[in-house]
Image: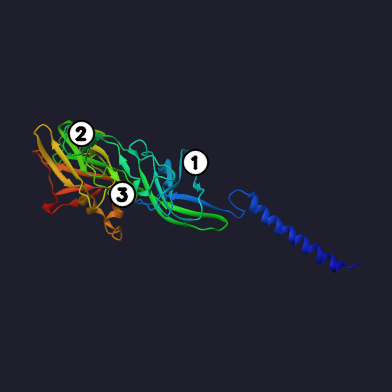
Amino acid sequence: MNIRGNIKKWSIVLATLLVGMAYSSCDNAIYDDEGDCNPYYHIQFKYDMNMKYADAFANEVTSVTLYAFDKNGVLVQKKSESGATLADENYYITIEVDPGEYDLLAWCGAGVGESFSIPEAVVGKTTLTEMKCKMNYDQEIGVTTPKGEVNEDLKPLFHGLKHVTLVDEEGVHKETISLTKNTNVVRVVLQHLSGNDVDPAKFRFEITDDNALMAHDNSLIDHCTLRYTPWSVTAGKADINADIYDPVMQTDDSNSRAESVSVAVAEMTVGRLMTYRRPVLAIYNVEKGTRVLSVPIIDYALLVKGNYNGKMTDQEYLDRQDEYNLTFFLDEAGNWASSVIYINSWRVVLQDADLK
């Protein structure tokens, strides 16, 4: 018996079978997303463009609409998903396109379809530059130039854009799109230096800006002047100088009398803040018919950019920060005492009168 010859013969047969099975698996694609000869493209998302530098996508983004445009800028695929599936840390969208170069555009968040409108996209027809996003606002009646008013708490809107080259190689290929948040809450606090009560009904708050229309690359397009007004105006009080036991001195100042401070708080939600725009916050005394203050929000916001954020560009800081708390003090005459303000809990002493 020629054992060595038989082993060699069966080895050749086995190798031939394995090669045949490999070709068969490529033809039949019997595996899901991997293990065959087809390429699969998984698109993931992250939202770490925030002050924590932490990916908050799973916690903050509730819907995703992804568009894939070919090298000619024409839409080849659109996919939308929402709900609990986005909370999975391994969440991704699979796109079924041929290998090649693409621009992947994402408009995400609850604001899509509620606070913002995006054109209906048609595969094979819609182009990348047509994918503008427009804020929904109330058109002001009786004006000769376009003007609008926004008095609601805008739902969050996120944007992402990435140019990718999808290779023609078997296996799973992952691409990640970074998102930028386009909505910001501005909270304005008015407080009397004297400690007197501040009646919110005596004041009118507004922010003006031209940021209703965003291009596919998230830049702002000249459109119209928006007037943002508060969706919430409330009064508040806080106790100060209350009796407090000092554990160091082991004393209890029983002569210290509790006092309180009264404030008016106005909350507004605005669109994307850009360094090349000049949004202005204005407060008016409706009883006197006078303007209490008028300040450029971006200039003031950047006053507290700080040393730790010094490596950021001004635009990156504005994109990472999505909440601004501004506290202004009124003198006994009800005018703005413009020497000191608080911005996001930072005390700022103003010495340049030109900022007003």
Q: Residue furthest right?
A: 1
Cα gap from disc 1 to disc 3, whole angstroms: 27 Å
Q: In the structure shown, which secondary structural element does the residue marked by tag 1 occupy?
A: helix
Q: Residues within 10 Å of mark 1 (few under 14, many from 20)?
A: some
Q: Which of the two discs, 1 and 3, labels the residue nearer the N terminus?
A: 1
Foreground residue among 11 and 197: 11
Q: Which of the two discs, 2 and 1, labels the residue nearer the N terminus?
A: 1
Residue beneath the point at 15% across and 52% down: 350
Q: Where residue 52 sits: x, y (%)?
A: 37, 51
**From the viewer's perspective, is residue 198 above or below residue 133?**
above
Amino acid at the residue labelled 2 = Glu
The label nearer to you, 2 versus 3, is 2
Q: Answer whether labels 2 and 1 touch (C-beta < 8 Å).
A: no
Q: In the structure shown, which secondary structural element does the residue marked by tag 3 occupy?
A: loop
Check disc 3 and report the residue beneath it: 321
Foreground residue among 347 and 343: 343
Q: In the structure shown, which secondary structural element does the residue marked by tag 2 occupy?
A: loop
Residue 251 appears left or right of 201 = right
Q: Answer whether labels 2 and 3 touch (C-beta < 8 Å).
A: no
Can residue 258 be seen at all in this image of the molecule?
Answer: no
Quarter of the image with the N terminus is: bottom right
Foreground residue among 124 and 121: 124
Check disc 1 and report the residue beneath it: 85
Q: Where residue 232 sits: x, y (%)?
A: 26, 34
Amino acid at the residue labelled 3 = Gln
**From the viewer's perspective, is residue 18 above or below residue 120?**
below
Residue 342 appears left or right of 110 = left
The label nearer to you, 1 versus 3, is 1
Q: Where residue 214 sits: x, y (%)?
A: 30, 46
Q: Which of the two discs, 2 and 3, labels the residue nearer the N terminus?
A: 2
Check disc 2 and report the residue beneath it: 140
